[in-house]
Image (cartoon, rainbow, N blue to C red):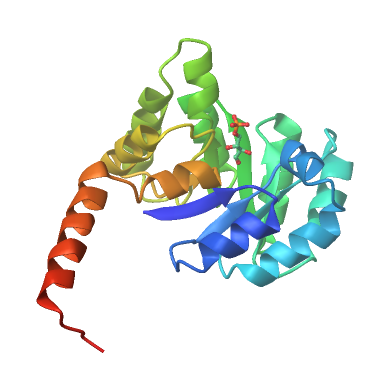
Amino acid sequence: MKFFLDTADIGEIRELADTGLLDGVTTNPSLIAKSGRNIFEVVAEICDAVDGPVSAEVAATDFETMLAEGQKLAGIADNIAVKVPLTPAGLKTCRVLSQAGTMVNVTLCFSANQAILAAKAGASFISPFVGRLDDIAADGMNLIAEICEIYENYDDFDTEVLVASVRSPMHITEAAKMGAHVATVPASVLWSLFKHPLTDKGLDAFLTDWKKTGQSIL
Ligand code: E4P
C-alpha cells in the first residue's frame, strides 16, 4: 500500500519524506490556499522533494480551460498528476491528458458508478472521499470496498484506488484490508500510525534493563 501526504506544507512533506515511507503527495485548492503560497512555486518544491506522484488540481470547470490548466500544471515536473473533478468536463479532460501520457487523479468521487466512469476515462487514480461520506452519516469505507471489488472484475481498468479524506488510522487499516492501492493522509494521521502505548512501555523497560548491564554496543 502506498502512502501519499495530503498537504501543501513543504515542511511536513520533507519531514515525512525523511522516513522513506512517503510515496507521493496530494494537494487541492483548499490546501494551496492554506499554504498561503503560489501554486506553481509550492508544487514545484513538492515535486522536487518527493519522487512519486504529486497531485495538483485544476480550478476551471469548463473543458477547454480545464485542459489548458492541466497542461500547464503538467509542465511543472514529470511527477505531476493533474487532478480534475468528477464531472463530464473533468472526465473529458482526463481522457485527453491521460492519452497524452499525463497522470490524472479524478477527485471528489462519492459513488461506485462515478469510479467506473473515471476508470473508463483512463484515470491513473480515483479519489473517493471517505471522511466526507462519514460526515453525512454514509459509510465511506463501504464505497472503497465496492470500488476495489468492481475494479478487480475488469482487467482493462488500470486505475488505482486512492483513499482520500482520511480522518483516522482505522480508515487506513480498513483500506489496506480491502486492497486499496493508496491512502492520502494528513501528516498527523500518518505520524499516529507509528504510535502504540505498548511500544513506548516496552522500549522504556528495555532501556532501563540495558542501562543495568553497564554495556555499550558502540
Ligand atoms: C485528497 O486528494 C483530498 O484533497 C483530501 O483528501 C480531502 O480531504 P478533506 O475531506 O479532509 O478535506
151 sits left or right of 87 in the view: left
Is residue 166 depicted above or below 131 in this figure? below
Q: Quadrant of residue 218?
A: bottom left
Question: Residue 103, position in %: x, y?
Answer: 62, 58
Is residue 82 depicted above or below 75 in this figure? above
From this viewpoint, is residue 153 visible?
A: no
Of the 4 image quadrants, the one containing the N terminus is: bottom left
211 vs 31, nearest the viewer? 211
22 sits left or right of 51 in the view: left
Question: Residue 59, position in %: x, y?
Answer: 83, 39
71 sits left or right of 153 in the view: right
Is residue 16 depicted above or below 184 in this figure? below
Number of numbered discs visible in the structure rendering: 0
Question: Residue 32, position in %: x, y?
Answer: 77, 45
From this viewpoint, is residue 156 visible?
A: yes
* Residue located at (18% from left, 71% from top): 211
Residue extending farthest to the bottom is 218
* Residue located at (39% from left, 32% from top): 144
Residue extending farthest to the top is 137
- Quadrant hosting ligand 1: top right
46 vs 83, nearest the viewer? 46
133 sits left or right of 181 in the view: right
* Residue located at (60% from left, 67% from top): 50
177 vs 190, nearest the viewer? 190
Question: Residue 140, position in %: x, y?
Answer: 43, 23
Q: Quadrant of residue 106?
A: top right
